[in-house]
Amino acid sequence: MGVLNQLQKWVVVLALVVSIGGHWAFLQSVAWVGMAVNYSKNATLSQALEKTFDGHHLCKLCKVVRAGQKAENSDEVKIELKKFDLATGTPTLFVFESPAVIPQIQLGPILTRTEVPLLPPPLLA
């Protein structure tokens, strides 16, 4: 049971990281490390880091990350609201009858009680 709980927690953490775009940050970091290592083979470390982060020397992974981030930002949910019009163009006429026309129901015999309530109330068995 403990392994399943740990797995569930990691799945939740991974889902949260992906939902806030953490996967792009991870991939960009991998790309920068790879570029720095690759550029440092033919230049000094400071020159390699400058070439890595100047934004003019993008590797394939950097281009993929940039395109993915751009696609994510442009995928806006477009909600189209439609007006639901209840008016049909013809006025509705409500007719209320006066209270004198409504028949009165005599509730006298129904609402009167002749028995005295039992004290104390009976216990349910």
Image: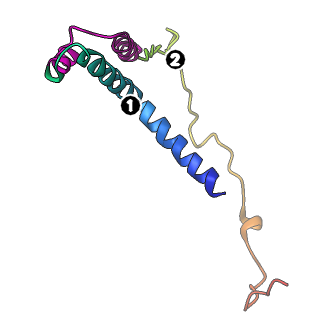
Amino acid at pointer 2: Leu
Tell me where residue 38 sits by quadrant.
top left
At 47% from the left and 13% from the top, the residue drawn is: 82
- The quarter of the picture where the C terminus appears is bottom right
**Is 38 placed above or below 111 here?**
above
Q: Position of residue 107 (x, y in %)?
A: 72, 61
At 44% from the left and 31% from the top, the residue drawn is: 18
The CA span between labels 2 and 1 is 47 Å
At 58% from the left and 46% from the top, the residue drawn is: 8
Tell me where residue 40 sits by quadrant.
top left
Residue of label 1: 22
SS category of the residue bearing label 2: loop
Q: Residue furthest front?
A: 42
Amino acid at pointer 1: Gly
At 47% from the left and 42% from the top, the residue drawn is: 13
In the image, 13: left or right of 123? left
Q: Earlier in the sequence, mark 2 or mark 1?
A: 1
Which one is nearer the viewer's eye here, 93 or 125? 125
Q: Residues within 10 Å of mark 1 (few under 14, many from 20)?
A: some
Which one is nearer the viewer's eye here, 106 or 115? 115
In the image, 4: left or right of 38? right
Scheme of colours in the image? rainbow
Region rendered in magenta: 47-75
Query: Which label is found at residue 86?
Result: 2
